[in-house]
Amino acid sequence: MAHVAAIGKALEGRGEVRVDVNQAWSESEAIWAARRLAEAGVTLIEQPIAAENHAGLERLTKLAQVPIMADEALHGPADAFALAGAQAADVFAVKIAQSGGLSGAAQVAAIAAAANIDLYGGTMLEGAVGTIASAQLFSTFSALKWGTELFGPLLLTEEILTEPLRYEQFSLQLPQGPGLGITLDWNKIERLRRDSTQGASIITS
Ligand SMILES: [Mg+2]
């Protein structure tokens, strides 16, 4: 708590602090922490408790200390419907991989919109293809109130596009080509694929 509060203080007026607890707290720890995080000016708490504890998430959301975002609790439209029906989150982290693909993620977003739940564009740290597919889907949402974090490609050392995605001023620059706007470099993909002749010989030797 002290560490987060100190970061918040140092950033005052220049940025905001959100925390992703990744399910680490019990519900009672989350109740204790939410009040202190609210006092420290933290703007969002992501998945404070276990993914399967929807009732706990609902209680924390209704405590209304700091907005609560569902991440690991949200694996596609069925979870979205259950969480929305119980008003068990203020924000959904939409991720295409975690939602079962583009269509599942679009349905999660539609359920959120119908239930007045805000959206955040999440990532499972996909490479270029998943990242730009996410960007394309997110661009169809009427609002993405909590922004997005499509930085997966920046963490990778190998590129599979003929032209890498461009990041400038902390933003992903949207490619202007048709479709997803990217072109795969098939030579690189051949070299990287695990079922290639080269890969197979490594596995069997
Ligand atoms: Mg998370």
Image: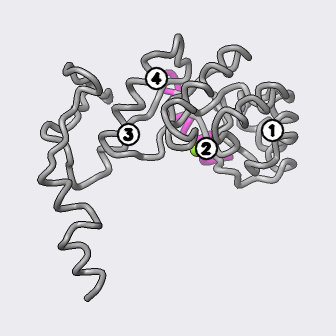
Residue, disc 1 = 57
Residue, disc 4 = 138
Q: Earlier in the sequence, mark 1 or mark 2?
A: 2
Q: Earlier in the sequence, mark 1 or mark 4?
A: 1
Q: Residue furthest bottom?
A: 205
Residue 134 at what x, y percent from top left? 42, 31
**Residue 68 forms part of the magenta stretch:** no
Residue, disc 2 = 20
For the residues carrying marks 3 and 2, which lies nearer the camera in this image?
3
Cα–Cα span, label 3 and label 1: 29 Å
The quarter in which the C terminus is drawn is: bottom left
- Which residues are the magenta region? 1-15
Q: Earlier in the sequence, mark 3 or mark 2?
A: 2
**Residue 5 forms part of the magenta stretch:** yes
Q: Earlier in the sequence, mark 4 or mark 3?
A: 3
State the SS at label 1. Answer: helix
Q: Residues within 10 Å of mark 3 (few under 14, many from 20)?
A: many
**In the image, what residue occupies the spot 72% across and 35% down?**
78
Cα–Cα span, label 4 and label 3: 12 Å
State the SS at label 3. Answer: helix
Check residue 130 in the rendering and tell me which mark sits there, or answer none: 3
Cα–Cα span, label 1 and label 2: 14 Å
Q: Quadrant of ligand 1?
A: top right
With 204 as the anchor, is 69 left or right in this view? right
Residue 67 at what x, y percent from top left? 71, 27
For the residues carrying marks 1 and 4, which lies nearer the camera in this image?
4
Q: Residue furthest top?
A: 142
Mark 2, ligand 1, within 8 Å: the answer is yes
Q: Earlier in the sequence, mark 3 or mark 1?
A: 1
With 163 as the anchor, is 97 left or right in this view? right
